[in-house]
């Protein structure tokens, strides 16, 4: 029998983490890719890649610092802020000619960020973060590398998949 203390068990756990991160990368990329297609009617591969990286950022925040005891609203807000910051960086480096996205004429565009960030898409990042965080938690729980997810909002705890197993 292989346990997580044996080398093979650690390799399996790493593979399971990679599967869960790949899932979030692809899910984030697809959601943003579809949003861009709806908004612009065109697609650019960089949108998929940077959205996937944002999803990985969410996963790393989720696994690295925030756990279930952290207020869910803080997790979502931090994740959306990270994704917005990454959108700005990608925009400055790869979208200076506005060929990938162009928010200049769209309501909610923030000029202080050189027109690379728009409040509508910040809202989209909030939605993606709110979905991606529990999705990653459930995927990791089902793969056996995380515990059963629960969430805290204020002083209330929510157990969408039933109470914690001891």
Image (spheres, rainbow, N blue to C red):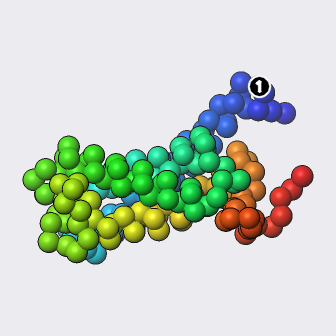
Residue 28 seen by the camera:
yes
Which residue is rendered at x = 56% and y = 56% of the image? 75
Q: Is residue 47 left or right of residue 145?
A: left
Residue drawn at point x = 42 percent, y = 50 percent: 82
Q: Is residue 25 visible?
A: no
The location of residue 118, given as percent across then percent down, is 27, 65
Residue 138 image offset from top left, x and y in percent: 66, 58
Asked whether 16 or 146 is in front, the reply is 146
Residue at 20%, 43% in the rendered image: 93
Residue 15 vertical position relative to residue 37 in the rendered view, above or below: above
* Residue 45 figure quarter: bottom left
Question: Camera-side residue: 162 or 22?
Answer: 162
Residue drawn at 10 percent across, 53 percent down:
97
Left-right relation of 65 to 56: right
Q: Residue 32 placed where, x, y %? A: 36, 63
Residue at the left extreme, as displayed: 97
Number of numbered discs present?
1
Q: Is residue 124 above or below residue 52?
A: below
- Can you say whether 83 is above or below 3 in the image? below
Front residue (pair 117, 161): 117
In the image, 120: left or right of 40? right
Give the side of residue 108 with respect to residue 98, left or right.
Answer: right
Q: Residues within 10 Å of mark 1 (few under 14, many from 20)?
A: few
Which residue is the site of mark 1? Answer: 6
Secondary structure under badge 1?
A: loop
Question: In which quadrant will I find the N terminus?
Answer: top right
Across and down, in percent, residue 59 comes to 54, 48
Q: Quadrant of residue 14?
A: top right
For this orientation, the residue located farthest to the top is 7
């Amino acid at each position: 029998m292989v346990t997580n203390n044996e080398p093979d068990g650690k390799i399996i756990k790493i593979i399971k983490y990679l599967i869960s991160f790949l899932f979030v990368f692809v899910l984030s990329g697809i959601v943003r890719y579809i949003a861009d297609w709806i908004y612009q009617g065109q697609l650019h591969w960089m949108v998929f890649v940077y959205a996937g990286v944002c999803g990985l950022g969410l996963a790393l925040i989720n696994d690295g610092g925030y756990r279930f005891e952290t207020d869910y609203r803080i997790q979502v807000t931090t994740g959306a802020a990270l994704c917005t910051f990454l959108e700005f960086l990608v925009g400055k480096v790869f979208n200076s000619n506005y060929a990938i996205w162009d928010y200049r004429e769209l309501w909610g565009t923030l000029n202080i960020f050189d027109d690379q960030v728009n409040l509508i898409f910040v809202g989209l990042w909030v939605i993606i973060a709110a979905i991606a965080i529990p999705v990653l938690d459930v995927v990791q729980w089902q793969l056996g590398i995380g515990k059963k997810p629960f969430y805290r909002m204020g002083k209330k705890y929510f157990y969408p998949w039933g109470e914690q197993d001891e």
